[in-house]
Amino acid sequence: MAERAGTLFDLDRAWRLHPHVSIRPERFGALLYHFDTRRLSFLKNKTLLAVVASLESQRSARAACTAAGVAAAEMPAYRSALGTLAASAMICERTGQ
Amino acid sequence: MADTPAAAAEPAGQTLPAEEAPDATVLVEDLLVEDLLVEEVSIDGMCGVY
């Protein structure tokens, strides 16, 4: 499913953290908690945390990845990770901009 | 991390054939990065936790 989510995830759209999700930074990366679905997502490194935290301020998910230092070769893995987060509503598309 | 699948892929005392090792290592590392970036759980059903 993660692979499918990653394939469908559009890196060139604008995304943001879901308003009902809180981020708790951890030594391994971060913990996301969704207050509606009561799901937890573990972000396993701090680069992914930087990507997720900057989605709101970047024009696209790809820009957020680039700003966080994600190399081109790593982009598919991060796309897949973001797709997983989108599928579980941890992040959602920004609209009306 | 001695208990990672990467470590398990190369048991102590065994080595991959020289011509296969680089590709196999790259493949395993790529899969690990993709698998390990996000892990999801639900707290529903965790009786006694909250």
Image (cartoon, coloured by chain):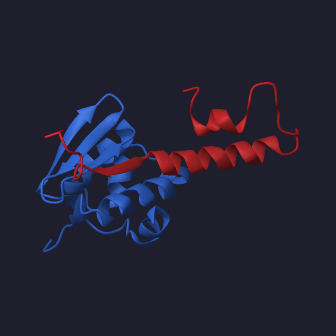
Chain colours: A blue, B red
- All told, the count of numbered labels is 0
The residue shown at (34%, 43%) is A43
**Residue toward you, B11 or A22:** B11
Q: Position of residue A9 (x, y in %)?
A: 39, 68
Residue A29 appears left or right of A2: left
Residue B16 appears left or right of A16: right
Quadrant occupied by the N terminus of chain A: bottom left
Q: Position of residue A11 (x, y in %)?
A: 38, 65
The residue shown at (22%, 65%) is A92
The residue shown at (33%, 59%) is A61
**Residue toward you, A28 or B41:** B41
* Res A61 visible: yes
Quadrant occupied by the C terminus of chain A: bottom left
Q: Position of residue A46 (x, y in %)?
A: 35, 37
* Res A71 visible: no
Using the image, determine if residue A65 lies above or below residue A59.
above
Residue A13 appears left or right of A2: left
Q: Position of residue A76 (x, y in %)?
A: 50, 58
**Residue toward you, A14 or A9:** A9
The residue shown at (69%, 39%) is B9
